[in-house]
Image (tube, grey):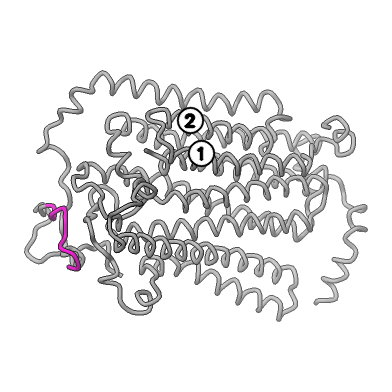
Amino acid sequence: MTDSHQHDHGFAHPVSVKLLLAVFSSLVFLTILTVVLNDLPLGSADIIIAMTIATIKATLVMLFFMHMFWEKGFNVVAFISSLFFVSLFIGFTLMDTGSYRDDIDSFPEDKRPAPRVDRTAPGVSSNTVQPMPPATLVEGSVNPLAKTNPYVRL
Amino acid sequence: MSTVEETADSHDEHDDDHHDHGEFIAHHFDSAEQQFDSGKLGIWVFLVTEVLFFSGLFVAYVLYRYHHPEVFVDASQFLDKVLGGINTIVLLFSSLTMAWAVRAAQLGNNNFAGKLILITMICAAAFLGIKAVEYSHKWDLYILPVSYYNYMEGYHPEAESGGIAGTLHISKWLVTLSMLPLLCLTLFSAGAVAMAATGKRLMAQFMLGLAIMMSGYFVGAFAGQTYQNWHEANLEAEEHAGDHGHDGDHAGDSIATGPDSTSERPPQIGVFFSIYYCMTGLHAIHVIAGMAALSWLYFRCLKAHFRPDYFGPVDYVGLYWHLVDLIWIYLFPLLYLIN
């Protein structure tokens, strides 16, 4: 296919419409599949399955939509090398935090960041920490923080 | 004025023959192919930097999930799989039309390429519309980044929202978010009318395209909000029907109005939403940048710039657009599909 097109269009390699539609329909199929599989009780395998499907989808997009199938080797190597560096980034950071895991998990509760500071209430200095509201509300009552939360004003 | 434009249009095919073949070739390139290959290498290197740019957020995600898996299981119940899935398909479809537009540009069919790029732009705006519905629903429920996270069980935002937004069951946050698109839609429509009135056909067509793109946002937002209201009504009906029977289907499903969500949520749940807003927000910024780049392509298609030996810009923007799609392909299962 590529060879015949090469003669017609110089350095352009138009991808056939059939192939584009086939790739799109398999992408949609895989999207629906991953959502359906998510509802099934697969235990800890679900993240592996979801990531595998995502990687298949990404490969399809790269190969055919991004024309990597016909791309110059150097460009492919350049792009794929970024994935290598990302895996180094993630891998080394995980190894590092893994070795400090006990320290992280036992980080004292009182050193955790304060939940939120109410800067709008009169007489409250910006250093005062508002206690967290109760976890449940009585049915039908209004959120008590609605009046003071600056992020809900319109 | 209009006669001049018309003659120019009708002589388009003629013009092609008289085009100097070096029209868009910078003087430091030997040939169109060399220029194309250089641009291609440039855009691939740019995509590498984009991947590395996003990788910082992916590292944050992986680390936090590694240390607090329970937070992710709990927090992703607030994300709606259906809206996320629809958005995935909208983006995939826009990738299809983009790849198709590259093909059309390679064949020198500017008219068709322009139409396909316009569809891509509409899909991008619809994606943002659906995203706006998702964001606004969360903001209503105080599901915010970590230091502002203040969600409470059984809290119904309808208690507060009055006015037109309240009666129409539209989130007031969605109304706020829609102001800028509304302004753009108005400006582009007015621009199209003004350009048409002054006889500038090309600019009028371009402005009309931009206005159509912006209306895509409202289609997305309307569809998303309709689904959201339908979904909430369903949940409420289930709640009223009593807890007998069918909780199996929706046990893992969203959202705040769910009857029996756990009362002890992990205290760090807001961190998940910090990561969620950073990742999807950065992605949305890329979608907006893509819309700007696509608008530029649309304009050049209207001017019939592309030919079999000059289609680089469409190809480059296409690669960028597919990368935005690639990132979403990973974001969707990582954020929405956690059990």
Q: Which mark is residue A21?
A: none
Q: Secondary structure at mark 1?
A: helix
Q: Residues within 10 Å of mark 2 (few under 14, many from 20)?
A: some
Say if A2 sits above or below B173 in the image.
above
Magenta segment boundaries in residue numbering? A132-141
Q: Secondary structure at mark 2?
A: helix
Residue A104 appears left or right of A16: left
Q: Residue furthest bottom?
A: B197
Residue B1 appears left or right of B132: right
Q: Are marks 2 and 1 in contact (CB under 8 Å)?
A: yes
Question: In the image, residue B37 lies at what x, y percent?
Answer: 72, 33
Question: In the image, residue B255 lies at what x, y percent?
Answer: 34, 54
Residue B299 appears left or right of A136: right
Question: In the image, residue B206 lies at what x, y percent?
Answer: 68, 66
Mark 1 sits on what residue?
Answer: A34
Which residue type does callout 1 highlight? Thr
Say if B153 sits above or below B45 in the image.
below
Which residue type does callout 2 highlight? Ile
Seen from the viewer's position, the closer of residues A122 and B119 is B119
Asked whether the residues under marks 2 and 1 belong to the same chain, the reply is yes
Q: How far separated are the C-alphas under marks 2 and 1?
A: 8 Å
Q: Let me know if residue A4 is in the magenta part.
A: no
- Residue displayed at 24% across by 53% down: B148
Res. B207 image quadrant: bottom right
Dominant secondary structure, magenta = loop
Dot 2: chain letter: A
Seen from the viewer's position, the closer of residues A42 and B300 is A42
Question: In the image, residue A154 lies at what x, y percent?
Answer: 31, 70
